[in-house]
Image (tube, rainbow, N blue to C red):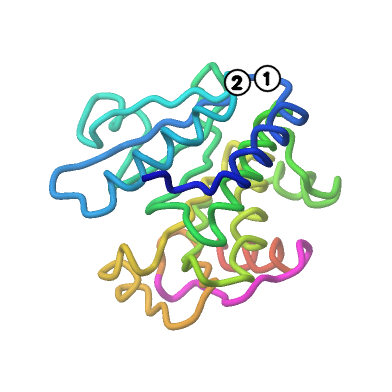
């Protein structure tokens, strides 16, 4: 049984046909005893079938490829251009519900050569970072505000090679969510520090300021 409805397949085929200018690689990592890996694998099969510009690769998270991309959990999804260069854009957990929309927007973003959709001022400040910053955006599939936070973080990763932005499905990674005290979403933690976080889908300037302040 298909996960994508027929009307969505038609819409997405047209969208990708119109918007994707170059190939986009979706690198999927699965693991042993992974409750959601089969579901995500099927979802990616269906997405790959929507356009010849979408390429899906599959690896075990403990493989050499997993080490190369520093994959910690499964299921994991890393989005790159065809060259496979890590641009710091990640999903941990199935991008379903509202987060499926985030995945689609990410694919379109990479399909236009992965140019960040941020203001010049934000890009300039991100380019001044002198140390690595990891942005962890905890989300749920039913949260309508989460995609804005997720996409802002992913765009920041595209703007700076110092930034990695991971979108974490809170319900699938309950222990991690518990460790970070996630009670409402989007919950954004900086540098994997449970004490350095903010909550909410902030406008871009405020989101950036939170990231800069909390990463000091």
Kindly identify which residue carries mark 1: 22
Classed neighbour count for the residue bearing mark 1: other residues with Cα under 10 Å, few (<14), some (14–19), many (≥20): some
Q: Is residue 66 toward the left or the right of residue 19 in the image?
A: left
Q: Is residue 5 above or below residue 21?
A: below
Question: Image quadrant for the C terminus?
Answer: bottom right
Q: SS class of the residue under badge 2?
A: loop
Mark before the other along the chain sequence, 2 or 1: 1
The quadrant in which residue 153 appears is bottom right
Q: Residue furthest bottom?
A: 183
What are the residue bounds of the magenta stretch? 194-205
Report the label total. 2
Examine the structure image and report whether residue 199 is included in the region drawn in magenta: yes
**What mark, if any, has residue 53 been given in the picture?**
2
- Asked if marks 2 and 1 touch (Cβ < 8 Å), the reply is yes
Q: Is residue 123 above or below residue 138?
A: above
The quadrant in which residue 14 appears is top right
Mark 2 or 1: in front is 2
x 31%, y 76%: residue: 178
Q: Nearer the viewer, residue 15 or 151?
A: 15
Q: SS class of the residue under badge 1?
A: loop
x 38%, y 25%: residue: 57
x 51%, y 72%: residue: 187
Percent of width and height locating residue 66: 29, 32
Percent of width and height locating residue 98: 57, 61
Percent of width and height locating residue 179: 30, 73
Q: Is residue 4 toward the left or the right of residue 77 in the image?
A: right
Classed neighbour count for the residue bearing mark 2: other residues with Cα under 10 Å, few (<14), some (14–19), many (≥20): some
Q: Residue furthest right?
A: 120
């Amino acid at each position: 049984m298909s996960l994508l409805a027929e009307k969505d397949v038609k819409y997405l085929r047209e969208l990708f046909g119109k918007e994707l200018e170059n190939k986009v690689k979706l690198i999927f990592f699965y693991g042993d005893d992974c409750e959601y890996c089969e579901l995500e694998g099927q979802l990616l099969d269906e997405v790959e079938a929507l356009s010849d510009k979408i390429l899906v690769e599959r690896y075990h998270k403990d493989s050499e490829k997993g080490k190369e991309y520093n994959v910690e959990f499964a299921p994991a999804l890393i989005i790159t251009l065809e060259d496979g260069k890590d641009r710091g854009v990640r999903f941990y957990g199935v991008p379903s519900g509202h987060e499926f929309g985030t995945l689609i927007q990410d694919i379109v973003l990479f399909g236009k050569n992965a140019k960040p959709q941020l203001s010049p001022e934000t890009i300039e400040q991100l380019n001044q970072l002198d140390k690595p910053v990891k942005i962890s955006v905890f989300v749920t599939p039913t949260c309508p505000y989460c995609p804005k936070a997720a996409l802002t973080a992913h765009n920041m990763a595209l703007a700076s090679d110092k930034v990695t932005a991971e979108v974490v499905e809170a319900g699938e990674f309950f222990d991690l969510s518990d460790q970070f005290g996630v009670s409402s979403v989007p919950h954004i933690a900086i540098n994997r520090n449970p004490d350095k976080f903010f909550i909410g889908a902030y406008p871009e300037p405020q989101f950036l300021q939170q990231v800069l302040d909390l990463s000091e």
